[in-house]
Image (cartoon, rainbow, N blue to C red):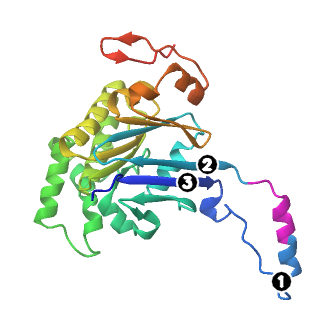
Amino acid sequence: MAREFRLEVKGLSFWYGHHHGRGHEPTGRSGSGASTASADRGRHAAHATPAPLVLDDVGFGIRAGTVTTVLGANGSGKSTLFHLMSKNLPVKDGGIFFEGTDIRKIGLRDYARKLSIVHQANPTFGDVTVETLVSYGRTPFLSFFEKAGDEDGRIIERAMDIADVADFRDRKLSSLSGGQRQRVWIAMALAQDTDTMLLDEPTTWLDIKYQVEILRLIRRLNEEYGVTIVMVLHDINQAMRYSDEIIGLKDGRVAARGAPEDVVTPDFIEEIYGVRLDMPETAGGRFVLQL
C-alpha cells in the first residue's frame, strides 16, 4: 500500500533555546545525593522566564508529486520549520516523518540520499567552477576517498541540463549573476537524484526576471520529473501561481491549509499578515493587489 504522505509533520513544537539544549529544564534527581547547588538551580529555573514558543503543535502532510508552499509573516515560524524539516535543527517535541520513518532515526547521509535541500543563503565558493559545485551533489553516495564514476557523471550532466547551467560549466561561481548562481545550487540539489526537494525562499534577492525563471524551473521539476517540492516563499501571488497547496503559519501555528484558490482570500491575508488587501478577479484568476 502506498503511503499517503511523502513528508509528515505531527504535533511539532519548538522553543528558542531547544537547539542549545535549553528547551526544557532537566528534572533533577531527588535524594540524599542532591546538592544544595542543584536545588538552587531548580529554584532559579522555576522563576526563569519561559523560552519563547516558536512552533506550537504544528501538523500537516505533504503528498508525493505536489508543490507545497509555506507562507507567513516574519516571525511566524517559517524558517524554524524549514530548518527542522532539513535536520539543521533537532526535533524535540512532536515528530517529522519521511515516508513513514521518523527523521531522527535517519542519518544525515541517508537523509541526503532521500531529500535535497536548497537554502536561502549559501557559501560563496568563489573559485569553484559550476560543474565542480554541481558534482558535490553526489557526495552522499560516495565514500570518503571514492571518485565519481560514469553513472555519477551522467547524473551530473542531467542535473546541469535540467537547470540550464551546462553552457557555463567551466565558469567560476563568483562570475555568475544571482539568478544563475541559484540555478547552480538547484542543479547541485538535482545531482542528489532525489524525488523530494526543500527550498527556503529561492527567489529572495533576485530580480523579477530571475524570480520567474527559478519558479518556472521548480514547477517544471515537479510536472516533468515528478519531484515533490516543499518551499518557503514571501510573495503571495507567486505562491498562488506556482503551488498546489499552501500552508499559512501565524504565531507558530497552522492557520490555514489547502489549495491556493480556496485558502488565499482577503480574510486569510488579514489573519496571516495583519493587513487587508483587495484581490481583483482577472482572466488569469485572482491576484493580491499589494497597494
Q: Is residue 134 above or below residue 78?
A: below
In the foreground, 72 or 135: 72
What span is colored magenta in the figure? 41-50
Apparent side of residue 80 relative to residue 38 in the rendered image (left or right): left
Q: In the rendering, which numbered label is found on residue 243?
A: none
Q: CA distance from mark 3 to mark 2?
A: 7 Å
Find the residue positioned furthest to the bottom. 32
- Of labels 1 and 3, earlier in sequence is 3
Q: Tell me the kind of residue under disc 1.
A: Ala
Residue placed under numbered mark 1 in the picture: 34
Residue 159 is inside the magenta segment: no
Q: Tag 2: Cα neighbours inside 10 Å, few (<14), some, or many (≥20)? A: some
Q: Tell me the kind of residue under disc 2.
A: Asp
- Of labels 3 and 2, earlier in sequence is 3
Q: In the image, residue 65 lies at what x, y percent? A: 27, 45
Badge nearest the viewer, 1 or 3: 3
Apparent side of residue 190 relative to residue 103 in the rendered image (left or right): left
Residue at the spot 89% in from the left edge and 79% down from the top edge = 36
Residue at the spot 35% in from the left edge and 67% down from the top edge = 109
Q: What secondary structure is the stretch in magenta mostly built from?
A: helix
Q: In the rendering, which numbered label is found on residue 56?
A: 2
Q: Give the structural element (helix, strand or loop) at label 3.
A: strand
Residue placed under numbered mark 3 in the picture: 12
Apparent side of residue 5 relative to residue 191 in the rendered image (left or right): right
Name the quarter where the N terminus is drawn: bottom left
Query: Looking at the rendering, which quadrant does residue 75 occupy?
Result: top right
Q: Give the structural element (helix, strand or loop) at label 1.
A: loop
Q: Give the structural element (helix, strand or loop) at label 2.
A: strand
Query: Looking at the rendering, which quadrant does residue 115 occupy?
Result: bottom left
Q: Is residue 101 visible?
A: yes
- Of labels 1 and 2, earlier in sequence is 1
